[in-house]
């Protein structure tokens, strides 16, 4: 248990979920390796379970307890952030608002306000006010102490790198070693971050299209230069006419683009994406819906994890809300220009509804800035050249800000450590176990 509000240490408490795989060589045990997979909203307990086989036969598994934790409000941690019921989320997905007319914008604004109100009612404003990264890192230091570690050894992926950089700033003397893989740039505002991410997904889409064009069954045709238009010709009709999935549900435009984004995280899903787009040509949406469900956290039983609600809640208190109309409209224009495959064909509206954070019931508790972590040991930042979700430059910037080493992976995927590349894994394991870092920033390739 930890305080809900660290400013009131004697007040309400909340619980955190942890899962530990013990070191197999107790005589050489170094301590705990705490893991967070990102999101925000993803379960660290599930991440630890999925990484267990990857560390089983190396020194990480032999010399470290692998500990995954669900940050406050997420997964097994209680109380959980909850905004929508399963039925409401299903309804929201099919009630796709891709309408930039004044009435469409008004409808979207009402939906966003309703969502924010339901988050406040079903989670409580006190919980929402204390769910941000500012508080997660305090929990992380409590866990470090409770596990008996004098110093923290940490592995953070994606948003988990932001947890790491904020922890490094608040508790630099408590850090033993950190690998931050798939870096979030802590100094980037939410608009610039979303535009950079849009550009990253467009780059990944272009590479998928080039791969697909070499196949006889490519859903987008044999000319990569025409792939964006071919893709839009497939998915834009879904705005007005969702297609059957074969299980009583309908695939919306939003579901199709969500499925595409899910597949662009890794080349391993490109085959599945092409199959789903081929199905869509036949007016079947099952494969794309399955991938969209994976992204949204929907199980086969129709129940959702709270990953999307938690994502929104954390983002809304980690960043200042944006209400300036000119800035919101400019963000829309920039994102559309950066990722034309996601252009929904609507003109830029005269007014922008913003997002859920525009109407959030509690103020932000953090804001973007470069971390200052005097006395921090050398960290290792891993950044992939064609990472669609967290662009390569963000890793360059984070490594520089923390005075750490940058490990470059020349590939197209989101995050790389403990995912089967011997070069990446060797550098990372040697660092975490023996605190050995290369003499210069290393590079690895598939």
Image (tube, rainbow, N blue to C red):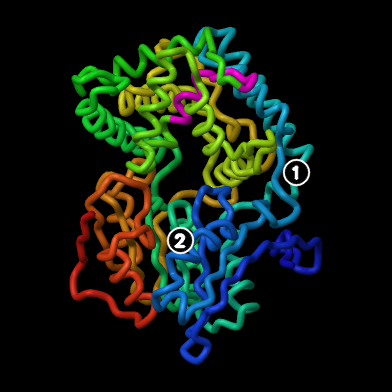
Residue 405, labelled with which disc? none
- Could you say which is closer to the camera, residue 91 or residue 358? 91
Residue 187 x/y as whole percent: 39, 50
**Residue stretch rendered in magenta on the structure:** 247-259
The answer for how far apart the CA atoms under marks 2 and 1 are is: 26 Å
- Could you say which is closer to the camera, residue 62 or residue 395? 62
Is residue 162 covered in magenta?
no
Residue 156, labelled with which disc? 2
Residue at image x 56%, y 69%?
Answer: 67
Quarter holding the N terminus is bottom right
Residue at image x 47%, y 13%?
Answer: 283
Decide if residue 363 is in sight here. no
Judged left or right of residue 252, residue 192 is: left
Q: Which residue is mark 1?
A: 123
Secondary structure of the residue carrying numbered label 1: helix
Nearer the observer: mark 2 or 1; the answer is 2
């Amino acid at each position: 248990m930890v305080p809900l509000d660290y400013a009131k240490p004697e007040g309400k408490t909340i619980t955190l979920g942890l899962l530990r795989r013990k070191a197999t060589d107790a005589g050489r045990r170094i301590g705990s390796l705490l893991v967070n997979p990102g999101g925000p909203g993803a379960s660290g307990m599930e991440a630890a379970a999925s990484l267990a086989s990857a560390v089983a036969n190396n020194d990480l598994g032999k010399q470290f307890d692998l500990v995954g934790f669900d940050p406050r409000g997420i997964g097994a941690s209680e109380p959980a952030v909850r905004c929508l019921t399963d039925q409401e989320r299903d309804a929201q997905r099919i009630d796709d608002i891709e309408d930039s007319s004044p009435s469409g914008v008004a409808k979207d604004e009402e939906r966003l306000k309703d969502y924010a109100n339901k988050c406040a009612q079903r989670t409580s404003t006190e919980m929402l006010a204390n769910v941000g990264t500012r508080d997660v890192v305090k929990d992380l230091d409590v866990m470090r102490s409770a596990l008996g570690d004098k110093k923290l050894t940490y592995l953070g992926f994606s948003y988990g790198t932001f947890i790491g950089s904020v922890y490094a700033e608040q508790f630099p003397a408590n850090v033993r070693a950190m690998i931050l893989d798939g870096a979030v740039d802590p100094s980037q505002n939410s608009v610039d971050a979303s535009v950079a991410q849009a550009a990253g997904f467009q780059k990944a889409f272009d590479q998928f299209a080039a791969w697909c064009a070499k196949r006889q069954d490519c859903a987008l045709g044999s000319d990569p230069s025409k792939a964006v238009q071919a893709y839009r010709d497939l998915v834009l009709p879904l705005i007005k006419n969702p297609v059957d999935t074969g299980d009583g549900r309908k695939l919306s435009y939003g579901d199709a683009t969500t499925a595409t984004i899910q597949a662009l995280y890794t080349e391993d899903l490109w085959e599945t994406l092409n199959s789903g787009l081929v199905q869509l040509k036949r007016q079947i949406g099952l494969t794309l819906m399955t991938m969209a469900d994976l992204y949204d956290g929907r199980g086969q039983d129709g129940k959702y994890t709270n990953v999307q609600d938690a994502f929104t809640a954390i983002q809304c208190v980690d960043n200042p809300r944006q209400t300036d109309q000119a800035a919101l409209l400019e963000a829309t224009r920039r994102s559309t220009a950066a990722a034309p495959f996601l252009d929904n064909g609507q003109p830029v509206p005269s007014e922008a509804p913003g997002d859920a954070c525009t109407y959030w019931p509690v103020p932000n508790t953090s804001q973007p800035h470069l971390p200052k972590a005097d006395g921090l040991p050398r960290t290792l930042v891993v950044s992939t050249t064609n990472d669609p979700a967290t662009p390569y430059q963000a890793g360059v910037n984070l490594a520089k800000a923390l005075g750490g080493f940058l490990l470059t992976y020349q590939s197209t995927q989101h995050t790389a450590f403990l995912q089967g590349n011997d070069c990446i894994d060797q550098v990372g394991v040697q660092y975490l176990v023996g605190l050995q870092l290369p003499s210069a920033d290393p590079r690895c390739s598939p």
